[in-house]
Amino acid sequence: MIELPCRPARMLRWRDGDRTYLYNPKNNLCLATTPAFESFLDTCSTLDRAEMERHLAAVHSPDVSRDLFARLDGIGDLLGILEAGDAAADPPLLAPEAEGFLDTLTLTLTHACNLRCDYCFDGLEFMKRSGTMPPETARAALEFLFAGLGQTRRCCVIFTGGEPLLNWPVLEETVLRARDMARERHVAVEFRLKTNGLLVDDRALRFFAEHDFTVQVSIDGRQEDHDRARIDALGRGSFERAVEASGRIAASLGERRLQIRATVTKQNIRNYSDNLRFLLGLRAGTVSCGLVMAAPDSPHVMDAGDLAVYQDALFHFAQDIARNPQSTESRRLLAALRCGGGPYGSASGGTSQRCGCGAGLWHLSVDVDGTILPCYRLAGRPRYVMGHVEHYNWRRVREVQERVHPIYARQHLPRCRKCWGQGICRQSCVASHLLDRGEGRDGCGDGVVLLESILKSAVRAPEAGGALMRF
């Protein structure tokens, strides 16, 4: 039975013609509401059950009041549209204890790369550094990870670079050592790799299959746009080799374990739609696109006109999805558009699942020299150094976490406190937010604007009638 008073869940609510719609981002449920239910939502935080029944009976009718409560008592919990307690009582994302919060660690195995992508962290400190992680640093990183697990029964190790496969001996040793450490502690461990794909040979595929890797390959779209930026040391494009590698990865590991990531720049933004559709056709388990991460004066950063093109592309995607919202193609397209913040989820689940990649909270990174960071993209930023894997203290780790925390704790920002899209903003790239906007700054992410556009277009489509629940 529904207990009153309570508060409505954070949902998008809009009126279109003579009907009001609700969208609940927690379960992707879209409702077409009745006037009685709108009255209920407007007053449920101030009236108890008896008062609410009298109110609805007076404003609408006793039959309408009884019917509404019967439906709420029957499926209200399933809908997830009501929450108990005060809106200010959201649980903190940072656990109070100094240890026992960590479940994912990214290791930058090397800054070296076999490609010379012209936008790669362009103009950032990352590109001014070089080095390769030695095996003793990787071992210390694993000790750090397992020391921070607490009661967590699952963990994840992610390998990145540069091109991490250039440091194959350390990757191989780290995986085997992590397996042994996990077995001793009765913990499940999974492995993920971010690569350009060119060094994925049969030996690597056998190793990935044996240890259940998930592999993310960087492909920017069709050949013209990919090869414009992603060239090797001889100036040759890498498109054919990257696509061929992605196909072999999917065949060996299964499509679900192949992820494709594209970078959107000033040079390829006008082909964004075609490139994304091409990548979706490769049938990877996950396809995502992210705006280039570069210095403000970089020739790859988009200006206002470029961003207008980007928004126009998103609007047309919304129209396409609205025409057939239940199709496989629409679902894959929507998933690609919504996961731009990062392809990795929490190993342990729970609260972490609301926080995108979790960088800086339950997901930390270790640079080639052993420096601990909230994200590998923050290499070279002293303000975000959390210590070193061979000499760290949890107090310093938590100090930096407190700086990152406001990006996730949107419910405490005045502009965001009641916004339905908090969870989507939490899934945006933390490093990009810190480098572009700074700590604690608000601002809606593209995902919120996109999803609202899609929903408002979708409910107008004739096909949407059967997909909406009228409440």
Image: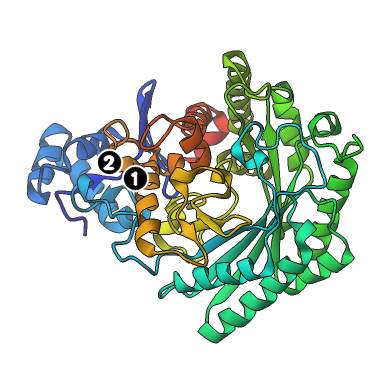
- Tag 1 and tag 2, C-beta contact below 8 Å: yes
- Horizontal side, residue 231 vs residue 441: left or right: right
User: Residue 135 appears in which quarter of the rendering?
Assistant: bottom right
Q: Quadrant of the N terminus?
A: bottom left
Can you identify the residue that label 2 sits on? 412
Figure check: 329 above or below 93 = above
Q: Is residue 178 above or below residue 273?
A: below
Percent x, y for residue 163? 75, 51
Q: Secondary structure at mark 2?
A: helix
Circle on res. 94:
none
Residue 100 on image: x %, y % = 39, 69
At label 1, the amino acid type is Ala
Q: Which residue is mark 1?
A: 409
The residue located at (55%, 86%) in the rendering is 184
Left or right, residue 386 beside residue 127: left
Q: How is the image coloured?
A: rainbow
Q: Residue at x 57, y 65 (%)?
A: 156
**Can residue 45 be spotted in the picture?**
yes
In depth, the one of 360 and 388 nearer the eye is 388
